[in-house]
Amino acid sequence: MSSTKRRIQVHKNAEEEIKKIWNKEETVLIIHYSCEGFYEKPEGQTSRIASIVVKHLDSGQTKSFSIHSAAEIKGISVDEIEKNFDELEKDFLDEFFEYSKAHKNHYWVHWNMRNANYGFEAINHRYRVLGGKPCAIDDKYKKDLSRIFDDLYGDDYIEHSKLQTLAEKNEFNTKDLLSGKDEAQAFKDKEYVKLHQSTLRKVELLEKYLKHSDGKNLKINSGMLKIYGVTAQGIFEWINDYWLLKLISGLIVLIISVFVPYFTLKFLGFM
């Protein structure tokens, strides 16, 4: 398969993934979480988790699991969270995994949650460390929107860090949004509510990215030639993807097929 054909196929597959997500919106969840900075931890230790947010795509209802909420339930002040962290983290992860078990056949849309450093496996491992038994979500139900967008638009469709810069490019609301570095600092400063607000905002942004991508009006840096490939076939596929261009190109072909023979015959004196 040529590089152009491969690029077109990758793009089409990603486009189908977006459509499948919307076709199953009643069983789609959007997830993001915040945690301790990776670089402050001794090698081999999983970062502690501060909050997890899950949103139902169809209803918009949001479920939160957080260290500060667990502390509030037990009457523990913010200043006392640090020395009770493991107990409180275990409490809200118990609740999260009960929720996961009840939704194990749902699709989980996420952003780069795909390894033991940051991802589903990191949450699972942290829960095991705390004495829990995670209900693992099958990989076939995990939908990494970051990878889907790389396939849909090309790797360099937006500057790094993509989740944040894509929001800025589209002028979406970024109130409370923290960068990875700022989240790590917020954890060190015990600003758990601030961390949670950032996680909520990121889930909202993922939902917006899905909606705008499905409607083909998400603003990105990649032009159509980059997305489809700089070839005649790539241009044809791009035209084919947009109904207005398809209609215009069809009218042009119709006009040419009718009038060119007419004027040719007239020029030759047959009419």
Image (cartoon, rainbow, N blue to C red):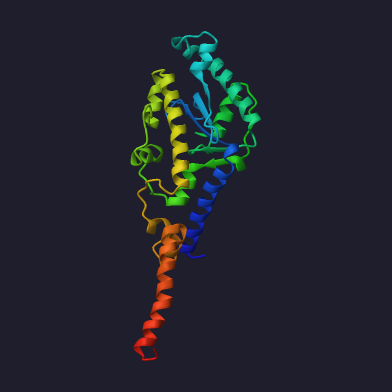
The outermost residue toward the bottom is 269
Total marks drawn?
0
Q: Is residue 45 visible?
A: no
Picture quarter containing residue 38?
top left
Q: Can you say which quadrant of the picture contains the C terminus?
A: bottom left
For this rendering, which residue is in front, 63 or 94? 63
* x and y percentages locating residue 29 in the rendered image: 56, 35
* x and y percentages locating residue 10 in the rendered image: 50, 55
Picture quarter containing residue 180?
top left
For this rendering, which residue is in front, 47 or 212? 212
Q: Residue at x 44, y 62 (%)?
A: 246
For this rendering, which residue is in front, 244 or 206? 244
* x and y percentages locating residue 223 in the rendered image: 36, 54
Picture quarter containing residue 265?
bottom left
Q: Residue at x 35, y 44 (%)?
A: 159
Q: Is residue 99 visible?
A: yes
Q: Note whether 130 is above or below 224 in the view shown.
A: above
* x and y percentages locating residue 168 in the rendered image: 34, 38
Q: With 117 as the anchor, is 249 left or right in this view?
A: left
